[in-house]
């Protein structure tokens, strides 16, 4: 499942955060999809998207991150790693109960985010350098 061909899905209702993370990940060679909330993400997954990793905010309208993650963990895509991004410190305790792979506190440093992403999905740029070297 951790294929560099599969996109990383960013689920956050803040357009600026979603776009900024997308720019940094794409600069590292990752493919990226975005979702405005849990319902949007769930619809993408139900339509066939199988991301290599999900970056998930918890507090969103329509379907929050907790509801989305519970649905994801109860379906055939339950093994997809999920990194929770939240400005709410109490969400860190909740993330382990939700079987999140990792928790990062917003605002997150880009290096910290990239290191967390690399733990679950190899960078296409790094993979290309290893093959050539």
Image (cartoon, grey):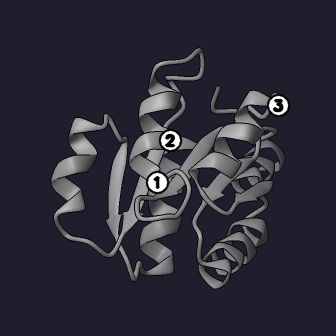
| Residue for point 53% across, 65% down | 114
Q: Secondary structure at mark 3?
A: loop
Of circles 1 and 3, the one toward us is 1
Q: Earlier in the sequence, mark 1 or mark 3?
A: 3
Instruction: Say which of 17 and 127 sits in front.
Output: 17
Tell whether 81 sits left or right of 44: left
Residue on which the image places disc 3:
47
Outermost residue, top direction? 76
Q: Position of residue 74 (x, y in %)?
A: 47, 19
Question: Residue 68 got which mark?
Answer: 2
Label 3–label 2 contact, CB within 8 A: no
Asked if the residue at tag 1 contacts the one at tag 2, i.e. Cβ–Cβ closer than 8 Å, the answer is: yes
- Tell me the SS state at disc 2: helix
Residue 97, compared with residue 112, is above or below; it is: above
Q: Nearer the viewer, residue 127 or 118?
A: 118
The residue to which callout 1 is attached is 64
Q: Quadrant of residue 16?
A: bottom right
Distance from Cα at disc 3 to Cα at disc 2: 15 Å
Indicate the secondary structure of the residue bearing disc 1.
Answer: loop
């Amino acid at each position: 499942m951790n294929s560099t061909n599969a996109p990383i899905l960013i689920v956050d209702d803040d357009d600026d955060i979603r776009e900024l993370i997308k720019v940094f990940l794409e600069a590292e060679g990752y493919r990226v999809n975005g979702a405005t909330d849990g319902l949007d993400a769930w619809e993408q997954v139900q339509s066939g998207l199988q991301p290599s990793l999900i970056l998930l905010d918890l507090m969103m309208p329509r379907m929050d991150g907790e509801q989305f993650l519970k649905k994801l963990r109860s379906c055939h895509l339950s093994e997809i790693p999920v990194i929770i991004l939240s400005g709410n410190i109490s969400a860190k305790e909740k993330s382990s109960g939700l079987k999140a792979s990792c928790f990062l506190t917003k605002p997150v440093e880009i290096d910290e985010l990239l290191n967390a992403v690399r733990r679950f999905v190899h960078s296409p740029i790094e993979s290309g350098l290893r093959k050539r070297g």
